[in-house]
Image (cartoon, rainbow, N blue to C red):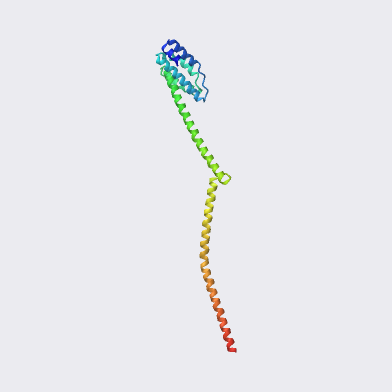
Amino acid sequence: MFRRLDMKYGRAEKLIDHILNELKRLKKVQEGDNMKFISLVETVEKCWLDLKRMNLEAEMNTATMVSQIEKLLPPIQKREWALRKQKTESKSIPLSFKEFLNFLLEEKSALEYMESDLREYGTAKGKINTFDANESENDENNNGVAVDPLQVQLQENQQVMKQVVEGLAQVAQAMSNKPTNRYNSDKNTGTNRNTEGSLSVGITNQIIMK
């Protein structure tokens, strides 16, 4: 911090040399390394702002500086920047370092948004997996084996159907037994009456014969 203050209020050449050396130490960003790209853009922006505070931004506003940083970009960002340059150069309008920095900041914001979505998706997916694992564990603890929810539902439906069929069978049997019992009762009554009549006739005949 004190070195920065010394450079800020000291000679401008010291600040310029320090910032240029800081930019030269930057490494090429590999494709897919989003966090490294974000760090690169933050360093470039910080150097630009430091020079701008001292009204020295012209030191970075050169084609050489743009080309130097451009070589550090991953393939996708390098291609996007090349397409933007072609559109601008076709209008004979040179690109400034500020425009290049704006492009880098746009790409940085897009990658930060993507990284945020990935983290949220990973967190939500982890919660779902944990819930499924807990449900599976509860089923195993209750029954000793893993239970398929569809199989449980099917078994419950079969039990309900079985109860309905048994109930209908009982109703049908009750309806069929009523006339049969009445008929058997009447038949038994008639048989008893015939038997009593036969006994009466037999006794009468015995009395007459005597």
Residue 147 in sight here: no
Vertical arrangement, residue 162 with respect to residue 88, above or below: below
Front residue (pair 113, 63): 113
The residue positioned 44% from the left and 19% from the top of the image is 46
Place of residue 34 in the rendered image (x, y in percent of width and height, measured from the top left): 50, 25
The residue positioned 53% from the left and 63% from the top of the image is 173
| Left/right of residue 134 with respect to residue 5 in the rendered view | right
Place of residue 97 in the rendered image (x, y in percent of width and height, measured from the top left): 43, 17
State the count of labels.
0
| Left/right of residue 93 with respect to residue 127 in the rendered view | left
The residue positioned 55% from the left and 80% from the top of the image is 196
Front residue (pair 26, 6): 6
Residue 141 in sight here: yes
Front residue (pair 58, 14): 14
Place of residue 91 in the rendered image (x, y in percent of width and height, measured from the top left): 41, 19
The residue positioned 53% from the left and 72% from the top of the image is 185
Q: Check the image and name the residue furthest to the front.
A: 2
Vertical arrangement, residue 188 with respect to residue 84, above or below: below
Determine the image quadrant of residue 98. Answer: top left
Place of residue 17 in the rendered image (x, y in percent of width and height, measured from the top left): 46, 12
Vertical arrangement, residue 154 with respect to residue 208, above or below: above
Vertical arrangement, residue 117 with respect to residue 55, above or below: below
Front residue (pair 95, 132): 132
Q: In which quarter of the image is the C terminus?
A: bottom right
Q: In which quarter of the image is the N terminus?
A: top left
